[in-house]
Image (tube, rainbow, N blue to C red):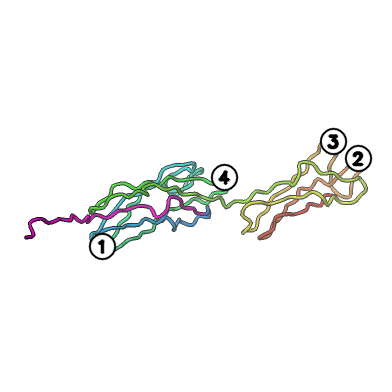
Amino acid sequence: TQNTATLSILDNDSSIQFSSPVFSVNEDGTPVLAVTVTRTGNTTNAATATVNLTNGTATGGSQPFAAGTDFDNAAQVVSFASGETSKTLVIPINNDTLVEATETVNLTLTNPTGGATIGAENTATLNILDNDSTIQFSSPVFSVNEDGTPIAAVTVTRTGDTTTAAAATVNLTNGTATGGSQPFAAGTDYNNAAQVVNFAIGETSKTVVIP
């Protein structure tokens, strides 16, 4: 006779977690569309969880962004309808003009509802990649012979993001040489007019000609 039996208790909970421990976005002012939260297990019920955003090396704040603020740190509720297994967060990023290293935002999942639990991947890091470029001289010292030939060796370089045009001004002031305008007066050594260096899209090097 069948006098024993086994009762299996099936888990009807769902688990909510980040799809990856690390996400990245360029600092170009476009909201992040790549931070994905997933749900596994029983998805017949609606469920929610809260994503909290806190400072790593990036600084959070509210919009409109104040100077020095990198991202909108408002907590966001992720809502799953019945049957839904994936949701994407939109996190506004401030496209500032500062040249910075990659900055980080800490993401944490909390407050599950609808019978859901928070999964093992309950924290993640968002990397904000700087999109600014740096313009500088290629060397701290340049030399030219005093033979009336314009200098063709003062090089200005650009590194970082070169997908947009950029410009910088080169100012020339006296060291032990005396500047002035052309035609040169007696005792004048060089033309001290400021020069604008213009970089087209993709350009990384320009040469300044100084009479």
First in sequence: mark 1 vs mark 4: 1
Q: Mark 4 touching mark 2, by CB under 8 A? A: no
Residue 113: numbered disc = none
Q: In the displayed image of the protein, which residue is found farthest to the bottom? A: 83
Side of 191 where 115 appears, left or right: left
- Using residue 104 as the reference point, say whether residue 167 is left or right of it: right
Q: Position of residue 28 (x, y in %)?
A: 53, 55
Indicate yes or no whether the magenta region holds residue 14.
yes
Determine the residue located farthest toward the top in the rendered image.
176
Amino acid residing under circle 2: Gly
Spatial separation of the CA atoms under disc 3 and disc 1: 78 Å
Q: CA distance from mark 1 to mark 4?
A: 41 Å
**Residue 181: percent from the left, percent from the top?**
84, 47
Q: Earlier in the sequence, mark 4 or mark 2?
A: 4
Residue of label 4? 101
Between 196 and 132, the residue placed more toward the observer is 132
Residue at the disc numbered 3 = 176
Q: Main secondary structure of the magenta part?
A: loop
Residue in view at x 26 percent, y 60 percent:
43
Q: Residues within 10 Å of mark 4 (few under 14, many from 20)?
A: few
Q: Position of residue 1 (x, y in %)?
A: 6, 60
Disc 4 residue type (three-letter): Ala
In the image, which is nearer the foreground, mark 3 or mark 2? Answer: 3
Task: Give the structural element (helix, strand or loop) at label 1.
Answer: loop
Nearer the observer: mark 4 or 3; the answer is 4
Q: Amino acid at mark 1?
A: Ser
The residue singled out by tag 1 in the image is 82
| Magenta stretch in the rendered image | 1-25
Q: On the picture, is 102 further left or further right than 84? A: right
Q: CA distance from mark 1 to mark 2?
A: 85 Å
